[in-house]
Amino acid sequence: MQDLLSLGGVRYFMKHLNAVILAGGSGTRLWPLSTPSFPKQFLPLPSGQSMIQETLARVAPLITTEQSWVVTGRSMADLAQEHLPTVPAAHILREPMGRNSAPAIVWAAETIARQDPDAVMAIFSADAVIENVEGLRQTLKLGYEIAEQGKLVTIGIKPTHPETGYGYIRFAEQVSEGYGYQAYQAERFVEKPDLATAQGYVQDGHYVWNAGIFIWSVKAILSEFHRHLPELAIAIEQIVDSLTQNPASDTLNTQWPLLQSISIDYGILEKTQNLIVIPADLEWNDVGNWEQYGALYPADDQGVRAFGSHSGLGSQNVIVYNNTERRIFT
């Protein structure tokens, strides 16, 4: 498989790969820039693209447009379509309300399975930044091979410091390798730690940040849902059946609010014995607050990081965001 490096070769190798972008967050920690009507996944990056646009661009060479999907809130669906015009309108799954990640993922899995029973899903959050794009693509290749064996795969970020704002995953013995990366059996999930605990995780060397990047076959994940969250799995089956028979059906509106609101981590991944972790240094940034967003922009000699028109008057170590045509002085 290592010699399949051309664009066509990669697509042939991963011909069943589907990219699913979860874009339902509101990004409240970046208020007032991020709002419920314009959350952080639509904010611009130094490249000029939005976060959600870069998310799709990273995997676009590996898939066709018919293999791209977005799950988002109904109120943000038109905005998602505007930012991602190549994604088919029918592939933007519009949630009537947020019910956390597990319902979103099983809805995408059940829908994709109707089109390709052998499909493999790669799942990404719309509001993270990854600088090492080539590294991501190589881990996806290894993850795809492992997923085709029926395993659930997550790409964990090698911690660069003892971060207290992220969840961690501890991994055990190595089970596979390829494309410059190694894969390990997942041992346990841990919640956001205090500083001393996080320092211990970094020193241990067997912990990675949980970045919410997953790869698995639709068969495998649907089987896990039927095992661990059977009521949710059955309810989604009924919703997808109804929409398949009649796209104008009101079943989604009536049944979605009744679904259990639960994360994929808590509902499935913390319970399964089938999870594999690929540790990777992807230069990943969750962009969860103003400090992380500002760090995306270069600093001048005074430590000022600025977006838009700005002139310095002696300020130091500040973040300036200006989306108007007027000049800001700081």
Image (cartoon, rainbow, N blue to C red):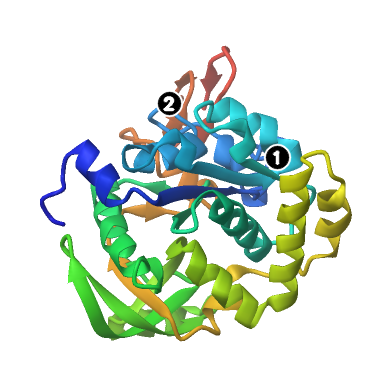
Q: Position of residue 59 (x, y in %)?
A: 36, 43
- CA–CA distance between discs 1 and 2? 20 Å
| Closest to the observer, 278 or 233 | 233
* Residue type indicated by callout 2: Gly
How many numbered discs?
Answer: 2
* Residue type indicated by callout 1: Thr
List the single residue furthest toward the top. 325
Q: Position of residue 43 (x, y in %)?
A: 55, 34
| Residue 159 shown left or right of residue 287 in the figure | left
| Residue 234 shown left or right of residue 308 in the figure | right
Which residue does the image show at 81% across and 57% down from the upper left? 256
List the single residue furthest toward the left. 3
Which residue does the image show at 17% across and 60% down from the upper left? 179
Q: Position of residue 271 (x, y in %)?
A: 55, 85
Indicate the quadrant where residue 267 lies: bottom right
Q: Is residue 294 above or below residue 13?
A: above
Residue beneath disc 2? 48
Residue beneath disc 1? 35
Q: Which mark is residue 15?
A: none
Helix, strand or loop at label 2? It is loop
Which residue does the image show at 61% across and 34% down from the upper left? 80
Indicate the quadrant where residue 199 lies: bottom left
From this viewpoint, is residue 165 visible?
no
List the single residue furthest toward the front. 245
Q: Position of residue 96 (x, y in %)?
A: 79, 48
Helix, strand or loop at label 1? It is loop
Mark 1 neighbour class, 10 Å CA radius: few under 14, some 14 to 19, many 20 or more: some
Q: Is residue 91 above or below residue 321?
A: below
Q: Earlier in the sequence, mark 1 or mark 2?
A: 1
